[in-house]
Amino acid sequence: MENNRNFFITIALSVLILSLWQYFYVLPHSEAQREAARIEEQRLAEQKKAAEAASPGGSETPVPQQGAIPNAPNAPGTDGTTLASREQALASTERVRIDTPSLEGSINLTGARLDDLKLKHYRLTVDKNSPEIELLNPAALPTGYYAEIGFIGSDKTGTVPGPETAWTVDGNATLTPATPVTLSFTNDKGLTFKRTFSVDGDYMFTVSDTVQNSGSAPVTLSNYGRVTRFDKPAVASIYVLHEGLIGVTGTEGLQEHTYSSIEEDKQFTPSKSTDGWLGITDKYWAVTLVPTEKQQFQPRYAYFEDGRPRYQADFLTDPITVDAGQSATVESEIFAGAKEVAKVNAYAEDRNIRLFDRLIDWGWFIWITKPMFYLIDTMYKFFGNFGLAILATTVVVKAAFYPLANKSYASMANMKKVQPKMLEIREKYADDKMKQQQAMMELYKTEKINPLAGCWPVALQIPVFFALYKVLYITIEMRHAPFFGWIQDLAAPDPTSIFNLFGLIPIALPDMLMIGVWPLIMGLTMFLQMRMNPTPPDPTQAMIFTWMPVVFTFMMAGFPAGLVIYWAWNNLLSIIQQGVIMKRQGAKIELWDNLVALFRKKPSPAE
């Protein structure tokens, strides 16, 4: 039938796209991600047992050229010394403790650098005893990653705060949401710098620098900020997500530079700006700078290979002048934490940070992905389980598309009614394809049938499918979100497999053989849905009809469990919907006959 042909063309193209995606992106990424998590957990375990001697957290920094942001400190290891463990690197410098409801760590008093930060609510794996996520690390480590605020001066200013400045704590030495910390530094030219760190209950730090000029002449200096990272994620992100340098500044707006692209370009310097933000983002975490709105600044994204390779997003403000006997204050903000949608949006609105919500990579189809997230999140607040939220969202989406789906299934039912007439036309004009096609079109017009209607129910699922995949992949709210039973992470594939009897046989299997319970349920529902229609007379179409659910079962097994659950539930709802509509239209439901025919023994030629 014509509608079956169109239906299978749509299915075949979808399978091709999804198969290529699965083979080249999803399976390699999933396997690499699990391996990276294992290596990271092993690394953290070894650190706790390490007793090796370590050198201090950084060597002296070369004196910067006038107007240039200082280089990052060279880390141990580049000169043959032993790299420190995290604990040893932290113990080698004086620090101010950080303790908030969401964060724990410390500020390095050398440089007043934010280089030790753990996320209290997030762990490396679903195991509640696994290590907390270490977001920021001292420069001495291979995973060095930090945020730093400093100044660029001149001969008249003397030494200004930079990477090697030794700050002194004034009073309180523990940073909490209720207790800011003030640091001070006085140079040989009569300049006193007072730096106050404050933090909210989530992930935003405020750094307020006051410069008091006690000298006899005015001084000019610039404020800089940078986020510097010495490594990059162990697993490269797939194309649906940006990881790397990011920012929104000036007339260019959103800027995204992957690690590989900035390695090739070395530097990108957009136009100056008076507002915005910039930093480095990972899949779930980010560290960004929000420069003061009072001063114009020059943003920059760079990759440096001198000394020790590193990635850096930084800004440098236009010079400010502090008259003798006067003071000036500049203020910057540092976001360092999890990219939770509600909190990122709140920072964008409450602090008037331009397009800060783009820190989360909603993609080009933000008009689909963002509403999809909010719908799921609303359902989650009602049900208290993201798996149930996905099921409820599927019902809502089905209801929204019901009128169109209703017309599609009704048209398919009408196609079945006129099947005898279509067969007559094919037999009558078997040798004249042109007349056959004309007669078919006339039949469609007379019976008011749309031959493409059968494609719509499948075609409509594709954008929703990709939007849901995007939401499951990018939003931290879905990370380690459990469903029921063995599904403890909706953003990860079903961990069971039929090939080891769902864990009864203790053998490890490659990813391609991890065909779990939910992929099997999805394949079964797809099989039943396709059997609702008559088996195509064309042998090639009939073969596709038979093997399509099997192909999808293997292919979907590596996708997030939440997505597979959505697809299985959507198939079941489609079966019910199609059955009801076909019954109303008086069309025969082919499901039972197709099942009987499939398992009935075919007679041999002798019989």
Image (cartoon, rainbow, N blue to C red):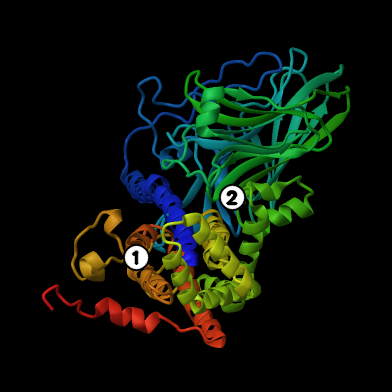
Q: Amino acid at mark 1?
A: Ala
Residue 64 in the image: x percent, y percent?
63, 16
Residue 137, placed above or below residue 26: above
Of discs 2 and 1, which sits in the foreground? 1
Q: Foreground: 298 or 401?
A: 401
Image point (34%, 59%), residue name: 540
Q: Foreground: 228 or 431?
A: 431
Residue 421 in the image: x percent, y percent?
49, 74
Image point (67%, 18%), residue name: 68
Taking the image as drawn, is residue 400 in sight? yes
Quarter of the figure that contains the N terminus? bottom left
Q: Amino acid at mark 2?
A: Gly
- Residue with the mark numbered 1: 542
- Residue with the mark numbered 2: 337
Q: Secondary structure at mark 1?
A: helix
Q: Secondary structure at mark 2?
A: strand
Q: Within 10 angstroms of label 1, few (less than 14), some, or many (20 or more) residues?
A: some
Image point (29%, 55%), residue name: 512
